[in-house]
Image (cartoon, helix red, strand yellow):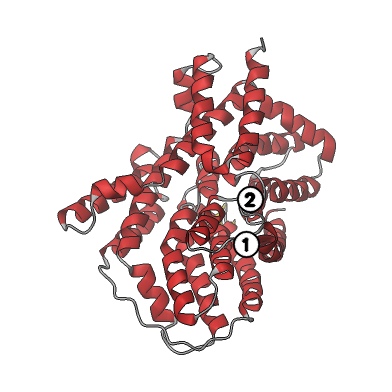
Amino acid sequence: MFEPKSLSLILFVLTYLLFFILPSRRSIIAISVSIIILITGIMSFKEVFSAINWNVMGIFVGMLFLADIFIDSRCPAFLATYLIHKKMSTPVALLIICMLTSFISAFVENVATVLIIAPICFELAKRLQIEPRDLIIGVAISSNLQGTATLIGDPPSMLLAGYAHMNFLDFFFYQGKPGIFFAIQLGAITSLTFLYFVFRKYKSEQEVEIEPIKSWIPTLFLVVLILLLAGASFFEESFFTSAGFICMLIAIIGLLWARWSNYISIRYTLKQLDWDTTFFLLGVFVLVGTLNKFEWTNDIAEFIYSSVGSNKIVIYISLIFISIILSGFIDNVPYLAAMLPITTILAEKGSFEPTLLYLGLLIGSSLGGNITPIGASANIVGTGLLKKEGYSVSFMQWIKISIPFTLIAVIPASIFVLFIWL
């Protein structure tokens, strides 16, 4: 029999391999291994409960509820069709959809953003008489890009915020310096320019009708949430000022409004919630907790440190490069969760402040997830929706767009962060 420390690492490695081999079963795998960890006594129930970042879970679940109400309001469809209702070139129309995706994704979780925009994409493709494949790929990778820009945009950002005790405004300005938001905007400018050249081949001059909106109230909830998150940043963090509590509070108010106004069924909303990613996140926290308990993170950090040395720039570049490669094949959520404590130890060994490495890790893991169809949840959802509509996406079709997009976004964003935080 293996000792608990060795067994914890074996289970961790096997679980990540299964995430790669069976991405559609990742939540079942994560929860099953978490149960095994409990049964074998590797971690106690108290340790498992403590390993879960409940603040991040509150942000994630709250945003999913709000996104569902937001989708049903038809506000995203209205905004998209309003922007492109005038007769214009097809490449410009498709680029506007990706820009709208980027904007929404900064404030709504990536999977939810893709679900919001995808129906608009398919409808536009029909009206413009073009295939939706490249547009859906563009939407998925655009959502992953801008989801990195704010605390509430994507689970990796939520994980970093929870781990480093960063608030909503810290993503804009942190310790008196420009934050990750501005680095991502620089990458967005260059990468969206690339998408325009991808869409140049489409030639159609169809006029698009404006989609009627059902209610502006869900949009108001979203705006109030953002203002509350920003306002809470000025107070000392407690349970009632935490981002998780605020997101869940506004989500509950939104659901009660939806029930009261017969706007949407709460039972339907609960049924449609992304339970797969929710349970997946819970399981990942437990897995990473086992690494921390048995100090595997220290051992891994020691190996990386001995391999790349103590130079801050070398560690930063190596971390980004490794993150891009691994996140292309491993979901960026478990990867980031595992790497954050390792990154902290690397900074301690090099005797420097860890912010530069945190931001490099976030950029590499979030944008690196764009490279393959299985690198991020939004990619898996996008390819699944295309398959449902009768359009298959090969690995080569995906990387033909994703690799240039990722490199064109990562390079300027990484240079910006290095220049500011070196």
Residue nearest the viewer, comparing 60 with 269? 269
- Residue 174 visible here: yes
Residue in view at x 43 percent, y 40 percent: 57
Q: Which mark is residue 151?
A: none
| SS type, badge 2 | helix
For the point 35% across and 80% down, which residue is it? 210
Which of disc 1 and disc 2 is earlier in sequence? 1
Q: Residue furthest front?
A: 390
Secondary structure category for the residue under label 1:
helix
Q: Which x, y percent locates residue 81?
A: 40, 78
The part of the image, by quadrant, that contains residue 178 is bottom right
- Quadrant of the frame with the N terminus: top right
Q: Which residue lies at the image location 30% right of the left edge and 51% below the top edge?
A: 250
Indicate the position of residue 271 as horizontal and vertical percent values.
32, 45
Q: Which residue is mark 2?
A: 359
Placement of 364 over or under 58, stated as above or below: below
373 and 187: which one is in front?
Answer: 373
